[in-house]
Image (cartoon, rainbow, N blue to C red):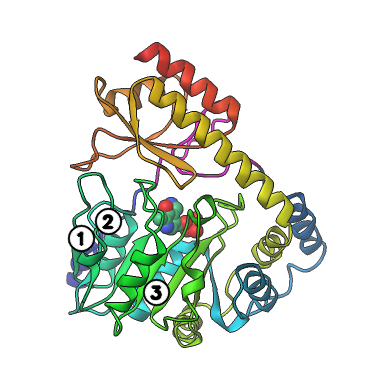
Amino acid sequence: MNKFWSEMVNRTEPYLPGEQLNDPAIIKLNTNENPYPPSPLVKEAIAEQLEGQLRLYPSPTADSLRETIAETVGVSKDEVFIGNGSDEVLAFSFMAFFHPGKPIHFPSITYSFYPVYAKLFNIPYELVRVNEDFTLPAELFFGSEGGVILPNPNAPTSLYMELSSIESILINNPDTVVIIDEAYIDFATVSAVELVKSYENLLVVQTTSKSRSLAGLRVGYAIGHPGLIKALVRIKDSFNSYTIDRLALAGATAAFKDRAYFDKTIMKIKETRSRFIETLQEMGFHVLPSQANFVFATHADRAASDLYLQLKEEGILVRHFNQPGIENYLRISIGTDEQMDCLLRKLEQLL
Ligand code: PMP
């Protein structure tokens, strides 16, 4: 094999997403998708695009979506960047803000795409060890040479870090970029977006995949100082200056406009989460206090790997990680009440 190719292949490693089984009979609780469909306005907006607009290129600046997001989260349009899923926004952010030779910091237990991007872009990294209870020691992120990235709430633990701790990380990394990956923030309390006005080194990354039921449309975005946004736009334009496709632009814009639908589904998922956690605890599970649309749970008497396989045989897919430290935990997405009841009935039989 060509030397460069083989070096690249050895250096990088593919990100392995959760199993995607298309059998509708499967209860799929392994990739934190929203169990409810997107707002009905999304379908209307996409149908309108299908009637004749697809022959035209989409807007290279995505102004209407950026304006709508800016209004929703309380910033201005020039503080918003749009990408093809937040995974792409994160990849561009690694390229724009992190550098070979300067180690970045992220938690030892976290979103598994971070080490993949670090290796792909040749960025060294140091893992910040999570505490025994999986909380993050903010002070260990201070004074990072290359920058910081962490999800809030963290994945797969579901734990939320208070804004005061995030602010301390920003204050103690004044010369590097701190990325807060808020894929699950709408199921939590407060977003770090309110800190963007005070900290030029903060980039908040969010997605429509979870709280707005649009995982299939691939729309993520970043919020930060216009200087950071300009850097991301420069990188994006060097790949493909047309941001995301017309259907995604129209669908995502409609989803943000339907605030009532958003509020209703978020409330429902939070209610289901509380009830599900309570029942799991009654069954002897230790469940971390979740602020996400999933829970992270372990049972003292039963190996998580066995439970995962047994549930899979019963047509219920949850997530199990073969990673030291969390190998006895299951990550379970919050589905509909019916789906969670079905899972609980199966678990009762298995325990
Ligand atoms: N960040 C975290 C922490 C995630 O769990 C995910 C979803 N797996 C993403 C980012 C990416 O989401 P998307 O690309 O669908 O926006």
Which of the image's four quarters has the C terminus? top left
Q: Quickly name the residue at label 3.
A: 93
Secondary structure found at label 3: helix
Residue 242 placement: quadrant? bottom right
Position in image of residue 213 (x %, y %): 61, 49
Which of the image's four quarters has the N terminus? bottom left
Q: Give the range drawn in magenta.
A: 17-36
From this viewpoint, which residue is outermost toward the top? 349
Q: Residues within 10 Å of mark 3 (few under 14, many from 20)?
A: many
Vertical comparison of 28 with 259: above or below: above
Left or right side of 159 for 264: right
Secondary structure found at label 1: strand
* Magenta stretch: dominant secondary structure: loop
Query: Which residue is at 55% across, 59% downward?
Result: 218
* Label annotation for residue 128: 1
* Label annotation for residue 136: 2
Position in image of residue 74 (x %, y %): 61, 73
Q: How crowded is mark 1: few (under 14 residues within 10 Å), some or many (20 or more)?
A: some
